[in-house]
Image (cartoon, rainbow, N blue to C red):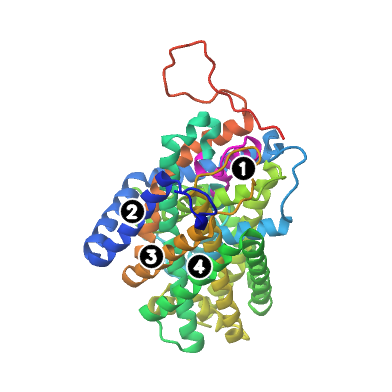
């Protein structure tokens, strides 16, 4: 039903209502039957890890290989949009949006915490002594793995075929368009509607996970810096403030909201990197950062496939597999958003700006923050591992800043950065979810960057904010990990199909799509995608 609130656009009921009802129902279930809900989620989590851990790691690695193959091949010269298409923003803005929509929220939460956790508690199956030299190498090479090339390969795998289908072949801006080169127009039938609905549901779970972690970290920062008691009420107030901020930002649209926020946040990231590098153990950062990078390159394949099948160590499930599942839950909507703003670029530029550049930034970030944290732990400057054990993972970054000059001032600056990071992420994600929730115009004269109805942005923003607060109150970090892992599970199978669609769209764009029906007229040719003419 059309409404002025929807800008005279119609809700796509098959895509909007199923994830909306299921997500809202899961929230109610978790409130009224928490123990039953937790048991069901826990059992599902362990079943997924036990049965499909091998497929998570294999899929993630294969996608990374495919992205580098496209980058280095002639297919990388394919232009997104027609020959005269112009970029809609600067390369820095494009990179900033990719960084903030991808790992921006993660690096502020885990920048000092994850290296210390691995340093103090390496996998038992590897026989590495905690706080040893070997543990330090393991910690740094592991965070390089988790926060660099693999997650962004997952993001852009879906982004590339959507960008080509949307800008070159006049297809709607939907996740289901990622299969256009594989099955043609059939991607917008029943299969496509199921794909889009599942992706919205998965992203809502992943967003609740990410935003919930942000509520914990912001609450911890307020407690450490301003001595404000943390807990359910504080988290609720923070959730309300952040939800208001990102719904307002989303309401203002791409130019006034996401582009400006991500640009300023990236500048803030760079400023903090330089500060920690200068006032921290600069020589150790340079030496051990390069040293551990060598270990990362040497052990990359081994770590990418680490499952501990014989020792049955739970570490891979709670770390690497969790991360791959988390990125998979995010990647359809992140890819969709990156595809939207990629017009006028080549596929090679798309990979360089949305994979290589943010991946290198992630490595530099963890080299600076991770090496500094390990240095503080090794030289008894601060017991960061003990603080994490006693006060939670979310407190790590603020305890870390206490080891540096002007630490209190920069804790406040970092707190602002955390808030902006989560506002930026939620802004871009709610905009994409809202866009997928309405029937899209696929006529030649449509406005290619038309904003989704503001009412849907606000609706999804409020729902995700509420679920985040519910989950943080009743489940904590471990509960978040399980929810996020389950959200990414169905997306993994979509990504396997998208790999074939991406390869076909890059190297064989005009070949016949697959057909799943027997045709009475065998001489009738199958539909062949043709690029739109402008």
Q: Which residue is mark 4?
A: 110
Going from N to C along the chain, the mark reached first, 4 or 1, is: 4
For residue 411, above or below residue 79: below
Asked if the stretch drawn in magenta spans residue 384, the answer is: no
Category of crowding for the residue at label 4, using alpha-carbon neighbours closer than 10 angstroms: few (below 14), some (14–19), many (at least 20): many
Residues tagged 2 and 1 counted as in contact (Cβ below 8 A): no
Q: Which residue is mark 2?
A: 22
Q: Nearer the viewer, residue 19 or 11?
A: 11
Cα distance, mark 3 to mark 1?
Answer: 31 Å
Q: Is residue 202 left or right of residue 422?
A: left
Cα distance, mark 4 to mark 1?
Answer: 31 Å
Helix, strand or loop status at disc 4:
helix
Magenta part of the chain: 155-176
Q: Residue furthest right?
A: 84
The mark closer to the camera, 2 or 1, is 2
Q: Which residue is mark 1?
A: 163
Cα distance, mark 4 to mark 3?
Answer: 22 Å
Q: Which residue is mark 3?
A: 467
């Amino acid at each position: 039903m059309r409404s002025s609130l929807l800008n005279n656009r119609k809700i796509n009921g098959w895509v909007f209502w199923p994830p909306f009802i299921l997500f809202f129902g899961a929230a109610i279930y978790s409130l009224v039957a928490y123990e039953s809900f937790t048991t069901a989620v826990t059992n599902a989590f362990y079943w997924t890890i036990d049965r499909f851990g091998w497929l998570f790691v294999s899929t993630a690695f294969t996608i990374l290989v495919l992205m580098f193959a496209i980058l280095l091949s002639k297919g990388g010269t394919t232009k997104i949009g027609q020959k005269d298409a112009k970029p809609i923003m600067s390369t820095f803005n494009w990179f900033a949006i990719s960084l903030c929509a991808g790992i921006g929220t993660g690096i502020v939460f885990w920048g000092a915490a994850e290296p210390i956790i691995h340093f103090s508690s390496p996998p038992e199956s590897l026989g590495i002594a905690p706080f040893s030299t070997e543990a330090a190498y393991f910690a740094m090479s592991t965070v390089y793995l988790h926060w660099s090339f693999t997650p962004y390969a997952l993001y852009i795998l879906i982004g590339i075929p959507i960008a080509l289908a949307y800008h070159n072949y006049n297809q709607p801006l939907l996740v289901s368009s990622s299969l256009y080169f594989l099955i043609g127009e059939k991607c917008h039938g029943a299969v496509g509607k199921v794909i889009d609905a599942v992706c919205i549901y998965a992203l809502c779970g992943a967003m609740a996970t990410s935003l919930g972690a942000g509520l914990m970290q912001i609450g911890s920062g307020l407690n450490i810096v301003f001595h404000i008691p943390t807990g359910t009420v504080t988290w609720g107030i923070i959730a309300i403030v952040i939800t208001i901020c990102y719904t307002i930002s989303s309401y203002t649209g791409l130019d006034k909201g996401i582009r400006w926020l991500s640009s300023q946040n990236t500048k803030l990231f760079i400023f903090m990197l330089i500060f920690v590098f200068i006032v921290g153990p600069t020589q150790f950062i340079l030496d051990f950062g390069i040293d551990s990078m060598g270990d990362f390159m040497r052990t990359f394949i081994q770590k990418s496939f680490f499952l501990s099948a014989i020792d049955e160590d739970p570490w891979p499930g709670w770390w690497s597999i969790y991360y791959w599942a988390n990125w998979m839950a995010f990647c359809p909507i992140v890819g969709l958003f990156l595809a939207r703003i990629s017009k006028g670029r080549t596929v090679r530029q798309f990979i360089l700006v949305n994979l290589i550049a943010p991946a290198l930034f992630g490595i530099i970030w963890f080299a600076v923050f991770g090496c500094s944290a390990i240095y503080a732990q090794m030289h008894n400057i601060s017991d960061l591992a003990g603080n994490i054990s006693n006060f939670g993972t979310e407190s790590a970054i603020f305890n870390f800043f206490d080891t540096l000059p002007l630490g209190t001032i920069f804790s406040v600056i970092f707190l602002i950065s955390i808030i902006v990071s989560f506002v930026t992420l939620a802004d871009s994600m709610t905009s994409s979810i809202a866009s997928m929730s309405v029937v899209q115009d696929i006529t030649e004269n449509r406005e290619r960057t038309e904003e989704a109805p503001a009412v849907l942005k606000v609706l999804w923003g409020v729902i995700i904010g509420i679920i985040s607060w519910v989950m943080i109150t009743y489940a904590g970090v471990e509960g978040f990990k399980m929810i996020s892992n389950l959200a990414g599970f169905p997306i993994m199978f979509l990504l396997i199909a998208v790999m074939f669609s991406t390869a076909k769209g890059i190297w064989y764009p005009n070949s016949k799509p697959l057909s799943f029906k027997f045709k009475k007229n065998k001489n009738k040719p199958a539909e062949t995608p043709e690029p739109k003419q402008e």
